[in-house]
Amino acid sequence: MEASSAAGRYDSVRYGERAPGAKNWNEMYLASRGAAFGTLLKSFLFQGAFFQFQRYTAYEDACRIRARLVADMKNLTGEVDFLALPVSGGASDPNPATLDETYRQFACTAFANVTGQPALVLPPASKGQAPLQLAGPRLSDAGLLSLGEHLLKLREGGK
């Protein structure tokens, strides 16, 4: 639902690239979103719309869970400046065979989108190493970017 809500802003009217040649607003939406969004995001949009409108109680439950996660993360980030977290539970398959495998790849990074926290991923230093996710409290974007830049410089031998 989060992806559906966030991507809804990129409707090619207020934001985003508008596909040329549409005869009416419906064609414009379909063509623009068809060109701009990949299969995974389209699946998120469809599922978000389904749960929001067809299973409204599930949507309300998700909103309550989100509020709880926001509160828990606020408490956790109140104790530290930033969090260092894994990016995934294992090696990531560049071509996942199922939607479940695709979702599993985002399991460790989804919290930042759901809670509205800034996060970034530092790529691995060399092949065989895992990437590192850094997350901070809300509105700590500048500090998080500075930390990421500092860690990359340290990894490259700088100070």
Image (spheres, rainbow, N blue to C red):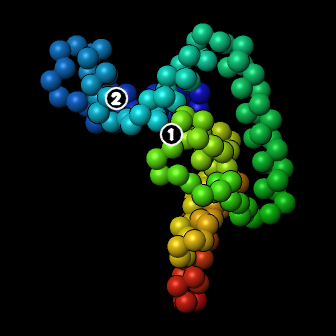
Q: Quadrant of residue 14?
A: top left
Residue 4 versus residue 103: which sits nearer the camera? 103
Note whether residue 120 is visible: yes
Q: Position of residue 142 (x, y in %)?
A: 57, 63
- Residue at the (47%, 52%) spot, across then down: 94
Examine the rendered structure and indicate whether residue 48 appears above or below residue 35: above
- Residue at the (15%, 24%) spot, across then down: 21
Q: Helix, strand or loop at disc 1? A: loop
Q: Quadrant of the C terminus?
A: bottom right
- Residue at the spot of label 1: 97
- Residue at the (71%, 26%) spot, across then down: 63
Q: Quadrant of the N terminus?
A: top right
* Amino acid type, label 1: Ala
The mark nearer the N terminus, 2 or 1, is 2
Q: Which mark is residue 33?
A: 2
Q: Helix, strand or loop at disc 2? A: helix
Are discs 2 and 1 less than 8 Å apart at CB? no
* Amino acid type, label 2: Arg
- Residue at the (78%, 48%) spot, across then down: 74
Q: Quadrant of residue 145?
A: bottom right
Q: Position of residue 67 (x, y in %)?
A: 76, 33
Distance from disc 2 to disc 1, alpha carbons, whole Å, reads 24 Å
Left or right: residue 157 compared with residue 80:
left
Packing grade of label 2 (10 A; few <14, some 14-19, many >=20) is many
Residue furthest front in the image: 97
Examine the rendered structure and indicate whether residue 146 appears above or below residue 9: below
Residue 146 versus residue 109: which sits nearer the camera? 109
Q: Position of residue 101 (x, y in %)?
A: 58, 41
Nearer to us: label 2 or label 1: 1
Note whether residue 135 is visible: no
Packing grade of label 1 (10 A; few <14, some 14-19, many >=20) is few
Left or right: residue 50 compared with residue 22:
right
